[in-house]
Image: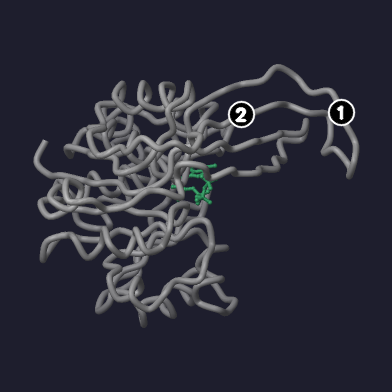
Amino acid sequence: MTGTVVVVGSANVDLVVDVPRHPGPGETILGGNLRRTPGGKGANQAVAAARAGGADTWFLGALGRDEAADLLLASLTGAGVHTDLVARSAEATGTALIWVTDDGENAIIVAPGANSEVSVDAVAARRLAVADVVLAQLEIPLETVVAAARARRDGARLVLNAAPSRDLPAQLWAEVDILVVNEHEARDLAGRDGSPAQLATALLERVPAVVVTLGGDGALVAERGSEHQSVTAPRVTAVDTTGAGDTFCGVLAAALADGASLAGAARLAAAAGALAVTRPGAQDAVPTATETAHLAREHA
Ligand code: ATP
């Protein structure tokens, strides 16, 4: 391992139930068996970064003092993520209530719980000050993302996965080195419609580099002063697309911390994202470094 990544973000327990159809207002319907799996964008991305193997990974987040917290800590430590920056809160661990219909369409309600208490204390600031890459998303308070960004050293990069879609304050725009968004988020942030290349060009007016993820079509890498580069996705049979974006972001951050170029890191991240969609779950679907390297080589 050559670099250090600090992932700042949310951790949720995902409570998933299969249903024949979405319930109507006031209606109760019977679903299938309940699945309880570790999730949350921050924790998913930390697991992906650690499994990618190129960097030492810390997770800065907050959990309750409940069984869901134990499930998340086991998943994080099992993947090799350092958890000494995880605060314990009197609030319940963040919970995502997810139901999935027979045709694969899901609906999600998130109760943020402890995630609304993620903050940067002195110990976290010391770790952020020696990180090579700080990776954040938008499921925690925006002021915490800004504080984490400001605590990084000169030369360390802030990779912001602007998901879920929210307006960004000017202080946060000013900190971003690499913005990672899917097409929908790119449109929201650019405030216009257009092709991925047009959206990326518009966003480059605000940040130095943009990666637009395009599902089965791979990703577009755009950097100021360079031609946009397309990264194609390896062809796979998708069984569950949950966590593809998080896997992509975690692997991208680890590869950057390990010294890869942005396009090189995106190629590795695309291979990992492709493997993630071939498996059910979020953190459980994240591939190992060996699996990712193998698919990336084959695809090249
Ligand atoms: P989600 O929110 O569902 O996790 P997202 O919308 O943030 O995902 P996507 O663009 O769907 O992100 O996926 C991230 C990356 O994963 C893509 O850029 C691509 O490299 C890979 N990927 C996703 N879906 C597929 C697929 N069907 N086949 C191959 N690769 C895929």
Side of 31 where 165 appears, left or right:
left
Q: Report, in whole angstroms, how far the alpha carbon at label 1 lies from the one at label 2.
A: 16 Å
Q: Secondary structure at mark 1?
A: loop
**Residue 277, percent across and down?**
51, 35
Residue most toward the top?
33
Expressed as whole percent of the image width and height from the top left, the position of residue 299 reads: 36, 40
Q: Nearer the viewer, residue 114 or 295?
A: 114
Q: Looking at the rendering, which quadrant does residue 177 occupy?
A: bottom left
Q: Residues within 10 Å of mark 2 (few under 14, many from 20)?
A: some
Q: Residue at x 23, y 44 (%)?
A: 254
Image quadrant in which you'd find residue 89:
top left
Q: Nearer the viewer, residue 10 or 292?
A: 10
Check disc 2 and give the amino acid type. Answer: Leu
Task: Compare marks 1 and 2 and give the one earlier in the sequence.
Answer: 2
The residue to which callout 1 is attached is 29
Q: Which residue lies at the image location 51% right of the left edge and 52% below the top edge?
A: 217
Q: Circle 2 sits on which residue? A: 15
Q: Residue furthest front?
A: 90
Is the Cβ of the residue at disc 1 closer than 8 Å to that at disc 2?
Answer: no
Image quadrant holding the N terminus, namely: top left
Q: Amino acid at mark 1?
A: Ile
Whether disc 2's CB lies below 8 Å from ligand 1 is answered no
Which residue is at a point 73% across and 26% down the rendered structure image? 18
How many badges with numbers are in the image?
2
- The residue located at (42%, 74%) in the rendering is 169
